[in-house]
């Protein structure tokens, strides 16, 4: 995990945009979570810029700086010249910083002048095959990590931030130096052991903007102060470093390269030996420092910034060679990153695991963050990527599953366009409607399902509707479920055959009726039998009563 870019897992939506843009593939995605391999990260900030879910937070020294001010420390701010992208009026910014309690505010362009003087000397000496500017720490890290054989072509000169920090420390040994930055890589450069004790803290431009939200900034209608070599204020603009150098003093070809992808291509060409005699001003950000990752999300106008900066420089006032005000020598070193070597058999095994069983399965779409499926397989071997994560495979599997369901469902399915013409029809629907030998694609659905109630349903705005209708020509009773997809301007119809159920229901109903009739007949017969028995019993009882009565009377008379 990176010390300077914190990942918020709760905000991450697994879109993989950060993995796709990472130029060194330090951003990994394993076990459904992104992670940063700090040793491989150059802090270009592209992952932070492209994240749409605020899942990345930048390290902040603001609490420490506020503590210094509260404790009465002597704190001096070195303001990067890209400040104009956020605060076009330098004097207004300066006054606001002083109001916050800073002891002094200075432009980093003062350090840029010292750096341009050192570059001028290098150009005159003509000792280097090529010269790569070292103002951008992300580019320096890229060379040290990814192109170690080009380290000797990095200008042996510190960045303007370090040069200015040294100058401030020289003038104010007891002061703490804070660098106002649009760049994440500057945070790491400030803590680089090679420059220990020069920059005490960095203050990001977003942090300062939020800090200013609690105070009222006063507009100051004063012009910027002039200083010798103030053309270096143009450093953060595209080609700004080169604009400070006199072209007629050197045989080197002066070229500026912006954007990390173009920088990598240029470095590859240098590595191949096809470029020689060039001074390259390299910036990892497009639009140079005015497009820095920490000002990208702030509402600003880089074109306004360029015009404001140019209003305060004399483009004809080129920097001349001079004895440096401070020591600007830097020693760059190749970083020994672990380099893995994988056999072809190992790579092919992973490709097979990823479902790339032959070359035609290798789509090389880049959706996973890697240019080719082979690169992805190597990343899997190095523990940087998930072998199961493949968008084309997922889509293919989903399509296959969808087709499998549609082809085998017992219901008929018809998909219609906005004019209710048939676009798709599954085999069951074809068989239902006796279309096995006819292609109905393009025909109006009413031509195969002539039903007035269905036609009325098609022309209503209701999203989902149901209908049961008997088609005499097919001898079918069909249940219809009609759904309209407004966004797609499509509809689909699900047909369920209820004919068998209807026949069963009729049979059951008839059986019930017959059973009722038989039961009623049995009851009627039983009632008749009871009545007949009762009638016979009644006659017999009456006769017995008469006989017994006569007998009783006879016995009474004898007594």
Image: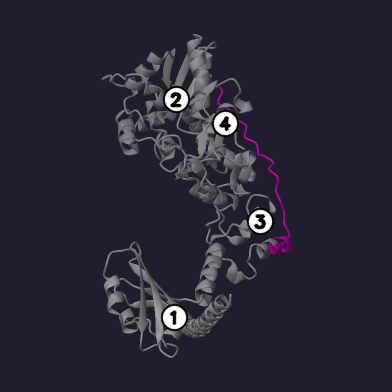
Residue 108 is labelled as 2
Q: Who is closer to the viewer here, 262 or 298?
A: 298
Asked if the residue under mark 1 is in contact with the one under mark 3, i.e. CB atoms within 8 Å, the reply is: no
Eyeballing the image, is 36 above or below 90? below
> The C terminus lies in which quarter of the figure?
bottom right
Q: Earlier in the sequence, mark 4 or mark 3?
A: 4
Task: Give the number of the mark in front: 1 or 2.
Answer: 1
Categorize mark 1 by other alpha carbons within 10 Å: few (<14), some (14-19), many (20+): few
Residue 111 sits inside the magenta stretch: no
Residue 378 is labelled as 3
Q: Earlier in the sequence, mark 1 or mark 2?
A: 2
Asked if the residue under mark 2 is in contact with the one under mark 4, i.e. CB atoms within 8 Å, the reply is: no
Q: Earlier in the sequence, mark 3 or mark 1?
A: 3
Q: Residue 82's x, y, as percent?
A: 40, 31
Eyeballing the image, is 266 above or below 353? above
Categorize mark 3 by other alpha carbons within 10 Å: few (<14), some (14-19), many (20+): many
- Magenta: main secondary structure equals loop
Disc 1: which residue: 502
Magenta residues, start to end: 320-349
Helix, strand or loop for disc 2? loop
Task: Give the number of the mark in front: 4 or 1.
Answer: 1
């Amino acid at each position: 995990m990176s010390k300077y870019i914190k990942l918020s897992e709760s905000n991450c939506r697994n879109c993989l945009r950060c993995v796709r843009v990472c130029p060194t593939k330090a951003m990994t995605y394993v076990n459904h979570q992104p992670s940063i391999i700090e040793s491989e990260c150059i802090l270009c900030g592209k992952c932070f810029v492209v994240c749409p879910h605020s899942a990345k937070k930048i390290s902040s020294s603001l609490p420490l700086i506020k503590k210094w001010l509260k404790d009465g420390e002597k704190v001096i701010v070195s303001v990067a010249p890209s400040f104009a992208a956020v605060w076009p009026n330098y004097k207004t910014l300066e006054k606001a910083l002083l109001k916050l309690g800073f002891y002094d505010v200075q432009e980093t362009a003062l350090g840029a002048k010292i750096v341009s003087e050192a570059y001028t000397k290098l150009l005159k000496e003509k000792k280097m095959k090529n010269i790569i500017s070292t103002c951008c720490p992300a580019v320096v890290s890229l060379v040290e990590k990814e192109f170690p054989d080009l380290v000797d072509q990095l200008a042996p000169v510190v960045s303007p931030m370090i040069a200015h920090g040294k100058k401030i420390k020289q003038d104010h040994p007891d002061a703490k130096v804070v660098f106002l930055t649009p760049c994440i890589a500057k945070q790491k450069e400030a803590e680089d052991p090679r420059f220990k004790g020069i920059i005490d803290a960095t203050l990001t431009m977003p942090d300062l903007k939020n800090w200013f939200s609690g105070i009222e900034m006063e507009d100051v209608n004063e012009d910027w102060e002039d200083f010798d070599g103030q053309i270096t204020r143009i450093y953060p603009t595209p080609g700004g470093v080169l604009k400070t150098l006199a072209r007629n003093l050197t045989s080197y070809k002066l070229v500026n390269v912006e954007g990390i992808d173009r920088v990598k291509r240029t470095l590859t060409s240098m590595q191949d030996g096809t470029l020689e005699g060039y001074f390259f001003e390299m910036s990892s950000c497009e639009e140079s420092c005015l497009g820095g990752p920490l000002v990208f999300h702030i509402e600003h106008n880089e074109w306004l910034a360029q015009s404001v900066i140019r209003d305060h420089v004399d483009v004809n006032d080129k920097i001349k060679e001079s004895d440096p005000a401070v020591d600007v020598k830097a020693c760059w070193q190749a970083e020994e990153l672990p380099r893995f070597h994988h056999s072809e058999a190992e790579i092919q095994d992973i490709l097979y695991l990823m479902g790339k069983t032959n070359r035609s399965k290798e789509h090389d779409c880049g959706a996973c963050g890697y240019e080719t499926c082979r690169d992805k397989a190597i990343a899997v071997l190095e523990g940087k990527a998930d072998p199961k994560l493949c968008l084309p495979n997922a889509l293919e599997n989903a399509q296959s599953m969808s087709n499998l369901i549609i082809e085998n469902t017992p219901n008929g399915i018809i998909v219609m366009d906005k004019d209710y013409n048939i676009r798709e029809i599954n085999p069951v629907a074809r068989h239902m409607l006796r279309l096995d030998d006819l292609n109905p694609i393009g025909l109006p659905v009413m031509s195969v399902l002539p039903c007035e109630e269905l036609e009325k349903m098609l022309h209503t705005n209701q999203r989902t509707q149901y209908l049961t209708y008997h088609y005499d020509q097919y001898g079918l009773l069909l249940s219809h479920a009609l759904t309209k997809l407004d966004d797609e301007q499509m509809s689909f119809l699900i047909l369920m055959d209820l004919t068998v159920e209807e026949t069963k229901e009729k049979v059951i109903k008839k059986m019930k009726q017959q059973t009722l009739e038989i039961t009623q007949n049995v009851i009627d017969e039983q009632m008749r039998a009871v009545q007949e028995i009762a009638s016979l019993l009644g006659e017999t009882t009456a006769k017995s009563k008469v006989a017994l009565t006569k007998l009783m009377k006879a016995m009474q008379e004898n007594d």
